[in-house]
């Protein structure tokens, strides 16, 4: 019999907890937090050693400033926050240059039976020291207090004081996948986006379900085709109702944590499904005016008559609830993360999810049903129809104007994804067929495998 050796590596530990505003006795939802290494006084000859998951040791020279290791927002839901860390001594602070840094100080305090108390001789601090020393952390209580004159101040600047990111010329694209087939599709999507987009592209891939081989080869391919790749992760909070089916867990991660999944300096993100091929320039979508909405989705096509009967939102509960609003597809969307965070959309979506998910028959298509259901509270800007073409719902005549092609399942018949891709993404409409894109990706894969064998 054959044996397979599996090697596990621990990449990060999590620091999590709850945050409360002592004055209001409630969570300061939207407060930006940052975690950095504890600054210690060192002699000129001293250095820092970090132990990686594989046991290797990285020795670096002393630094004059503590760089931010991870950052996040405080949620309205129980004041929850979560940050990536590793064993060691850390400084937790309110993110510098954020509105919260003007309003709040960190103070020592406790919460007992729902009542908050400041510690005796409590003083205002700019940081809280946290020691990460085991695997059984019970959560940290972070108490903040408003400075004099800021008793009624809000946590977000006015529109005219919105911050500007240093990399505003970069298009940030989010996606996720699980299984080797969809990892293959994901690389093809990345290649098509990079080829068609006129600006630099940075991909943010959700790593919880990606294979180690994919992560290594995707990084190598990104260097070859001229884009960037980073991996993001998040742990589903214990207080938020969980899902048992893997597909529904993935759908949840796709929509429920957009406000905390990315670094706070990422101001906008475009989600693209792994099984899409992009024909248009995502810069056009990036620059599109969402007219005050926090996100934009493409409505489902209604131009293919043979599948209209499968569009459940046209009758019954959904037709009544939508009240004339369109039902949108979740295969592609653009999120104004500044607006999303300022309007506390993440808190609203998690609250609605918590209510609806109590019924196991609710939210059949979680990532899609949730934002569509929430439209009366959180508006959706409807993207032009050409930004998502799917053969199952869109007419053949509309294909020529399409800017992305999605390989969504056809309710009338089943067809393997690869055969569908070869058939649909071919012909004069495409600069490269799916077969050609797949062959190019395979070439990068072979180069990567050869390089790893040489190292070994």
Image (spheres, rainbow, N blue to C red):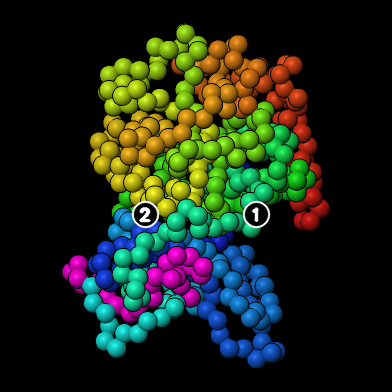
Q: Secondary structure at mark 2?
A: loop
Circle 2 packing at 10 Å, graded few (<14), some (14-19), many (20+), is few
Residue on which disc 1 sits: 167
Q: Is residue 304 visible?
A: yes
Residue on which disc 2 sits: 237
Q: Is residue 331 visible?
A: no
Circle 1 packing at 10 Å, graded few (<14), some (14-19), many (20+), is few
Q: Is residue 147 magenta?
A: no
The location of residue 347, given as percent across then percent down, is: 35, 50
Question: The N terminus lies in which quarter of the figure?
Answer: top right
Residue displayed at 59% across by 36% down: 285
The location of residue 348, given as percent across then percent down, is: 33, 46
The location of residue 172, given as percent across then percent down, is: 60, 46
Q: Is residue 196 left or right of residue 19?
A: right
Query: Which residues make up the magenta segment?
Result: 91-115
Q: Is residue 35 left or right of residue 358?
A: right
Question: The C terminus lies in which quarter of the figure?
Answer: bottom right
């Amino acid at each position: 019999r054959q044996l397979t050796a599996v090697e596990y590596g621990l990449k990060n530990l999590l620091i999590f907890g709850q945050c409360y505003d002592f004055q209001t006795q409630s969570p300061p939802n939207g407060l930006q937090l940052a975690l950095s290494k504890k600054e210690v006084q060192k002699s000129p000859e001293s250095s820092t050693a970090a132990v990686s998951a594989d046991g290797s040791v990285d020795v670096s020279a002393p630094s004059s400033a503590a760089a931010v290791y991870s950052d996040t927002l405080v949620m309205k839901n129980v004041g929850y926050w979560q940050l990536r860390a590793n064993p060691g001594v850390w400084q937790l602070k309110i993110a510098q240059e954020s509105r919260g840094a003007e309003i709040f100080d960190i103070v020592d305090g406790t919460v007992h039976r729902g009542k908050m108390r400041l510690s005796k001789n409590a003083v205002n601090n700019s940081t809280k020291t946290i020691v990460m020393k085991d695997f059984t952390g019970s959560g940290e209580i972070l108490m903040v207090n408003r400075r004099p004159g800021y008793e009624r101040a809000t946590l977000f600047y006015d529109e005219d004081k919105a911050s500007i990111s240093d990399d505003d010329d970069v298009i940030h694209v989010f996606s996720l996948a699980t299984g080797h087939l969809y990892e293959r599709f994901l690389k093809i999507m990345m290649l098509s986006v990079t080829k068609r987009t006129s600006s630099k592209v940075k991909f943010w891939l959700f790593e919880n379900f990606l294979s180690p081989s994919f992560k290594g080869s995707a990084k190598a391919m990104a260097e070859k085709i001229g884009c960037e790749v980073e991996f993001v992760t998040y742990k589903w909070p214990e207080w938020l109702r969980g899902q048992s089916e893997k597909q529904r867990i993935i759908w949840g991660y796709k929509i429920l944590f957009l406000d905390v999944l990315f670094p706070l300096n990422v101001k906008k993100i475009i989600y693209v499904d792994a099984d899409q091929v992009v024909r248009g320039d995502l810069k056009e979508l990036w620059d599109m005016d969402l007219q005050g909405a926090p996100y934009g989705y493409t409505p489902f096509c209604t131009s293919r008559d043979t599948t209209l009967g499968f569009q459940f939102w046209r009758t019954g509960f959904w037709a009544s609830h939508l009240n004339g609003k369109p039902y949108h597809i979740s295969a592609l969307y653009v999120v104004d993360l500044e607006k999303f965070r300022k309007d506390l959309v993440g808190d609203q979506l998690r609250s609605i999810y918590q209510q609806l998910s109590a019924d196991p028959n609710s939210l059949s298509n979680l990532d899609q049903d949730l934002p569509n259901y929430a439209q009366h509270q959180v508006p959706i800007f409807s993207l032009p129809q050409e930004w998502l073409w799917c053969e199952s719902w869109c007419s053949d005549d509309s294909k020529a104007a399409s800017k992305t092609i999605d390989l969504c399942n056809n309710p009338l018949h089943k067809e393997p994804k690869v055969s569908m891709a070869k058939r649909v993404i071919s012909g004069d409409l495409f600069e490269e067929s799916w077969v050609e894109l797949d062959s190019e990706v395979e070439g990068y894969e072979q180069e990567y495998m050869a390089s790893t064998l040489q190292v070994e």
